[in-house]
Image (spheres, helix red, strand yellow):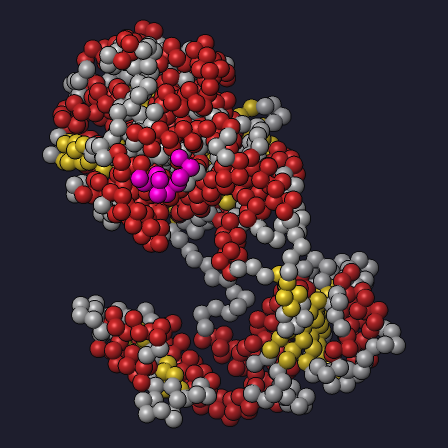
Amino acid sequence: MVKFAYYPGNVARAASIEVEDCIQPLCSTLGIELIEIPKATSDGGNIISQASTILQHTLVARNMALAEEKGLDLMTTCATSHGIHCGTIDVMNNDISLKSKINSTLSQVSGVEFTGESKSKHLLHVLVEEIGLDKIKSLVKNPLELKVAGYYGPNMQKEGASSEDQVFNPQYLEQLITALGGIPIDYDLKCQSVGAPSLLTNQSSTLRMTAAVLNDAKENGAQLMVSACTLSHSNLDTYQVKAGRITGKDTSMPVIHLAELVAFALGHHRDRFAQLKTRVIVIGS
Amino acid sequence: MPDSAEALWDSINADGVPKMEKTHFSVCALGDTSYEFFCQSGKDWDLKLEELGAKRVFARQDCDVDFDDSYAAWAAGALPAISSVGGSVAEVIEESTEEESIESGSEESSSGELDEIMADGDRKLIVLFGSQSGNSEDLAFRVKSKASEFGLNAEVFDMEGFDLNSLTDTSRLLIICSTWGEGDMPDSAEALWQLANSDKRPKLSKTYFSVCALGDTSYEFFCQSGKDWDGAIEEMGGKRIQERADCDVDFDPTFQKWVIPALAALASVDGKGEYHEELVQSFIELVENKGKKSSTGDLDTPVILREPIELIFKIFRYNPLVVEKGWDTYECKMPGHFSVLDALNSIKSTFDPTLSFRGCGPLSGIIVNGAVVRADRTRLLDMVELCGHELKIEPLTGYEVVKDLVISTKNYDAHRIKSTPWMIPATRSGVNTVSGTTIGTMDASKATELHELGDIDSPQLLHSFSDTLPYDSEYIGPALVMHAWKRVNDERFSEKARKSSINLLQNDGGAWNESDCSSFGRHGDFGKKISNSFNECRAELIRKKGFSGKHGRLVKWYGLSVKWSGKVNETTLYRQVLGPLGLVSNLFSGVSMRMMLGFTRTGAKPFRSIFPLIAPPAGIGKIPPMINSKVDSHHEVANLFNKLDKRF
């Protein structure tokens, strides 16, 4: 049994509630114990940093310190959150004066300090590196049997956040899809941003970026897209009709989150998986 | 101990200090013999390091108040010994001793005289250049760096604006001058040449000189300018100490043959202006021996070789004549030390002469497996380590492709022109330097910060870092945003120019058009630095204009919703940022419907709580609830915001 402090990200318990529905049973099957941090807050979503970088770093450091207090690494299902955590850890490791300032604030406000002992981990990296593809493969009850395009996004594809996977040509999602009985689809834009932080402000370019990713995957034969990022998932799924209308591109494709994909293959929510397959095979979007 | 060394001395004397067996050292101790504990601190360090297991490569030198000679003797022994560390220390010391004993035998007689002349008063050498394309200037500075080996203090001057009369007291002069057109002087040398041919020209009876002339044998008046200066200096009374060198287009071999004897001869002129011809050969030997001892001369470039590696290149091709694009694949074996540009050149010469790409320079940028790199500065071996043996090579994104890997920077240049990138200086106070030049003043930390902001190898490559750029033709791109941001921070620019930069960043096409700064982080430390700078820039824009506009509102309400509950409230963001019209647009564009019907796509629950039954549509399908519950100990979050940023 491996144990992590669990950070659901900014939307897994709001607009992307299906992630929350799936993460608990999948972790239970794979022997991952998730410990809640009821005091944890939003990580600032790279939005608060546009007004105050130190405020965002302090929010993240507080969450990390709360995990550290429990002697655990922090696991998240959101690539954006993981990228933000790694960014703050990187800054605190390299800027002693900022680290001391942040810790001084945390100490006064919450009575905790972040030493850097706890690390941030993304669900994908935990599955591939700590649980192992062989074990996952052996537990598959409903093989995917679909052509699946993996979407990484830009946040965890940077040095220090991509774990042992390659920064520029990551392969973990493809390996996982294969282990779950699916056929991975390779396409160019799997790490390109879909502009999630600017969905409400730069909608025109954001929708073009979203359409390009969906269309690239679709043209390469994908029937389904799986996102490692909860935030980007929202663009790719909810806004795909609007993105298709603006660009004139074919963007219709079911998009689900990594936690759903794994949970379905491991035999959880059979009804949901059946419904998804129906949409993929019969309706196509 | 000096105050600054006290803490380190205490720490090295504390318990549990690690052993230093892998460390090699030598100590130069500074002190004053009029005190009882002469050089005690240095002696202490010497003993302590030995106690900790470090290996002494050269004996300690104790220096008195007048430390120059003792220090030089120590540096001459300690530096070669420490630089040779890698093999056995004993070997290093033995070898150096052996070398010294051999050399001392052969050079003993002349070295004393050389030392004497090198320490004899004035050792100034004037290097005067007249340059049209920069070659003469480059050679002048190479002469300067070489001159120090002969114990000469070289000063380099452009002929433009040079005071010819200042040469009257000069005993050593080198002239390097190129020829332009039909035997003409370079533009920068013309005025000085007129003066040298007028009645006002000075007498140069104390001056020893030599000339290096640059030219092109395909012209009739080959090296004419250099020849003219050679004659003119002699007419003014100068004594030619080394025959003129006439260099062709490939000037390096002739220059190399000239520079050593010329410097050796001028080094043999003593402080009183007397020429000691018998020392010239000794100077040449001294410098040649130094060259043999050091690993490379200042003009050599070392080459690091790597084993050949098997590679598969998948290269993007575009033919503008038939408007056809596709990919070509080549399997080859190439040396690991090849740059990507070397590889492209090799493919072009071996397989396909029609393959097009740019050569050296900031525009040689391409994308290799998603990484934005300069083809001329990126080794194949490094790319293989980064992304495997299959290299997919594409043109830079954000530009129009002209052919294959060649891009047009037309749009980038058009945005750049619009951004008025030239300097409009502010009126500033300055200080006078010793030489009488007036310079501006800037705080050192501010200057460093500015330098770091502008430390961009290729703006054209940075332009391609953005994932947004290919989808937003209005956006000026990260390179121009960073350029404008640097200008905002640069107090040397006028207030008006800085305001104009703020407007450029704030308006459509500026800093807010970047949809996702985190995509820069993919490009290593430099990308992370750009991402941070974007945040600083946007924070400044918000400080100037407040939380106004869509971008300002997003930041404000995101922050407020986190402060109020510890969580992001998405419905608040939609309502505050998009406003009623935006929400209606989402209703008709299918966004709201798709959120509500989320359960029909993945089988999720249609109603999340009792709330949507009372106040729909929030809570139906994937539409998030309107009100968040608070995180535990929420007062800590509110305190944290109040402490760090009271605007929220």
Q: Residue at x 61, y 87 (%)?
A: B121
Report the side of B421 relative to B184 (left or right).
left
Q: Residue furthest right?
A: B199
Q: Tell me if residue A33 comes above or below residue B218 in the rendering.
A: above
Image quadrant where residue B577 sits: top left
The quadrant of the image that shows the C terminus of chain A is top left
Q: Nearer the viewer, residue B226 or B59?
A: B59
Image quadrant where residue B619 sits: top left
Counting from the top left corner in percent of width and height, residue B511 is at 52, 36
Please name the predominant secondary structure of the magenta segment in the image: helix
Residue B71 visible in the current orientation: yes
Q: Tell me if residue A48 comes above or below residue A116 in the rendering.
A: above
Q: Nearer the viewer, residue B286 or A36?
A: A36
Magenta span of residues: B639-648
Q: Nearer the viewer, residue B104 or B468?
A: B468
Report the side of B73 relative to A135 (left or right).
right
Q: Residue at x 40, y 76 (%)?
A: B79
Q: Tell me if residue B448 comes above or below residue A65 in the rendering.
A: below
Q: Is residue B321 magenta?
A: no
Counting from the top left corner in percent of width and height, residue B591 is at 41, 14
